[in-house]
Image (cartoon, rainbow, N blue to C red):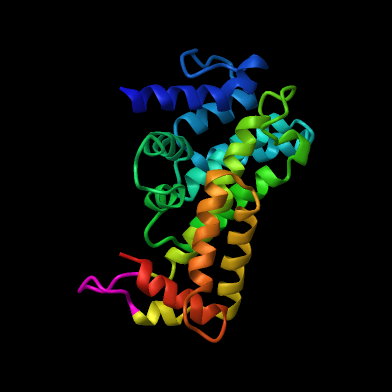
Amino acid sequence: MLRAALRTVLFILLSHTLQACGTASKATPYVSLSEEQEARKALDAKDFERAIELYKALIEAEPETYARYPFLATAYAGQAGFDIFETLVESVVTSQGSHLSPVDVIKSALPADPNDLQLQAMASARDTILAIPADLRSKTNAEASYASSAALQLEFYQAAYPLMYMNRFVAKTSSGSLDPDRLASMTPEDAAAILDSLRSAEGLGGDLGTAVSSVLSEIDAQPGADTKEKLIQYLSTHSS
C-alpha cells in the first residue's frame, strides 16, 4: 500500500508540467491526439522507442520547452532497463531504517549484464537532463514546475550510469563466480570513464552523493598500480 501510494505521488510530481499544459492524463481517453499526447501515451505504455522518437521531435521543434526533457529522459532510462519511479519509491522506503545505501538501491534496479544499447540509453537519460539550464533543474526553483523532478532524476541517472558501466565487467560463470575474462576486458579508458562519472555523481551532494563518495573512497583504497587495477580489485571483492 505504501509503495503504491509513493509511486503515485512521484508520478504526479513528474507529470505535473504536462498536465498543467493541458495534456491528457492516463485516465483521459485519447481521441484525436496531439503529438505531445501521443508521446505521453507511448511513455505510459512503456513503448520507449516510440516515446523517444516523439519527444525528440518535439524538443527539436521547441528546444526551450524544457518541461519535455524529463519525459524524454524517463523514456531513455526505461530503454536502459531502469525504472526511475520504482527506484525512487524503493529509495524512500529503504531510507526508513534500512541498512541499504542509495547506491545499493540503484544497483538492485539495474540490468545485471547491460548491453551497449542500454548503457548508451542511460547516458542519454543523464545528458538529456543536463541539457536543461542549471537554474531550471534545481530543487530550489519554485517557478518551473519540472525543476525539482528534473534535479531528482539527474541525481539518480548520474549515479546509475557508472554503476551500470561497472556491471558490464562483473558477469558470472556457470559456477557463480566472477568471470575473470570479463574483468580483464576492462580498458584504462573504461576505468577512467567510470571514475569520472562517479565523481560527477559525488558532486551532486545529498545522501546519494555521500554514498557515491564512499564508493570512490573504497576504490581508491584498493591495491593496484593504477585506476584500472584498483577498480578491478574493488569489483572482485564487492560483487556478490
Span highlighted in magenta in the image: 171-179
Please identify the quarter of the rendering in which residue 15 is found.
top right
Most foreground residue, 104 or 4: 104
Residue 172 part of the magenta-drawn span: yes
> Where residue 150 sits in the image (x, y, percent)?
63, 36
Identity of the residue drawn at 56% across and 73% down: 191
Most foreground residue, 125 or 47: 125
Please identify the quarter of the rendering in which residue 91 is found.
top left
Q: Is residue 99 left or right of residue 119?
A: left
Say if 107 sits above or below 29 in the image: below
Say if 237 sits above or below 202 in the image: below
Identity of the residue drawn at 44% across and 41% down: 83
Identity of the residue drawn at 58% across and 30% down: 39
How many numbered marks does the figure carry? 0
Q: Is residue 131 left or right of residue 72?
A: right
Visible in this render: residue 54? no
> Where residue 47 sits in the image (x, y, percent)?
47, 38
Quadrant (top left, top right, bottom left, bottom right) of the C terminus: bottom left
